[in-house]
Amino acid sequence: MSKLLLVLLLFCFSTEAVAARRIVLLAPAAGDILLKLGVADQVVGVTRNLKGFPRARQVGSHIHPNLEIIRSLAPDLLIISSNRFFSEQMAAAIDAPVFTYHPRTLDEILQQIGELAATLDKPTAGKRLIARQRQKLTDLRPLTTTPKVIFEITAMPLIVAGSGHIVADIVNRAGGVLLAPSQRKLVRFNPESVLARQPDVYIYQVGPMNKNPLPPAERGPLKRLDARFLRVDELLFSRANTHSFDNVLKLNRYFREASNG
């Protein structure tokens, strides 16, 4: 009997040890995934402009993370978006496993949800979350025409989304085509080039990267653009997560309504 009790106690403690993560989240887009996997209480550090983790300490921005604060939190998992802003040397100084979350398409989002769920010992929650995203796409409706789209990242200077940005797949899945001048994620552009490409829809985001931009319809050469202008929330649109699937449906509906006059 005592041996059985000892085995049960060891099992309980070992399960807790696996599940009790101390996560520092440096990839803002992954925050939505962690919330929906039910591990918010395991997140001890987050970047600025990331809501939903009231118990977590801010550790700077994803571009300029504070290494000393991160080290003081003693994380056992770092979630980053790339090595560009959090190098291998910085990761070595923390001495914790690193998970890179950087999906560029809807399929890659689903793949990384599965990988995160496995890493956090949440396989069932991960499968359910993936299934819900796939179910959303069954509500898509075909379009009679294929709208050409420009997606503005910032107004000053004018930067638009390239084909490496998540919005490229969002627009394509919604039935449109992104006029992406490059395979890069972000591309410097100019209003004259926008006019030359004659987009049907000009989407501009508003948020930390593009604060209070003058509406494109009131802006210099873009006043001459014969297009529909659509304002979207940067934090919902430019972060690759479950909101990306919602955005596909919203754009698909917008495109259908626009084609109907």
Image (cartoon, rainbow, N blue to C red):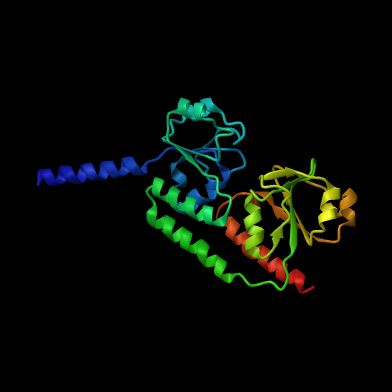
Q: Name the residue furthest left.
A: 1
Q: Which sits in the foreground, 66 or 199?
A: 199
Q: Is residue 96 left or right of residue 250?
A: left
The quarter of the image holding the C terminus is: bottom right
Q: Looking at the image, is 93 positioned above or below residue 36? A: above
Q: Whole-percent x and y of residue 73? A: 46, 31
Tell me what residue is drawn at x 69 percent, y 44 percent.
186
Tell me what residue is drawn at x 51 percent, y 67 percent.
135
For residue 244, say whether it is visible: yes
For residue 72, say whether it is visible: no
Q: Looking at the image, is 115 positioned above or below residue 146? A: above
Q: Which sits in the foreground, 13 or 171?
A: 171
Q: Whole-percent x and y of residue 137? A: 56, 66
Q: Whole-percent x and y of residue 114? A: 44, 53
Tell me what residue is drawn at x 55 percent, y 66 percent.
136
Residue 190 falls in image quadrant: top right
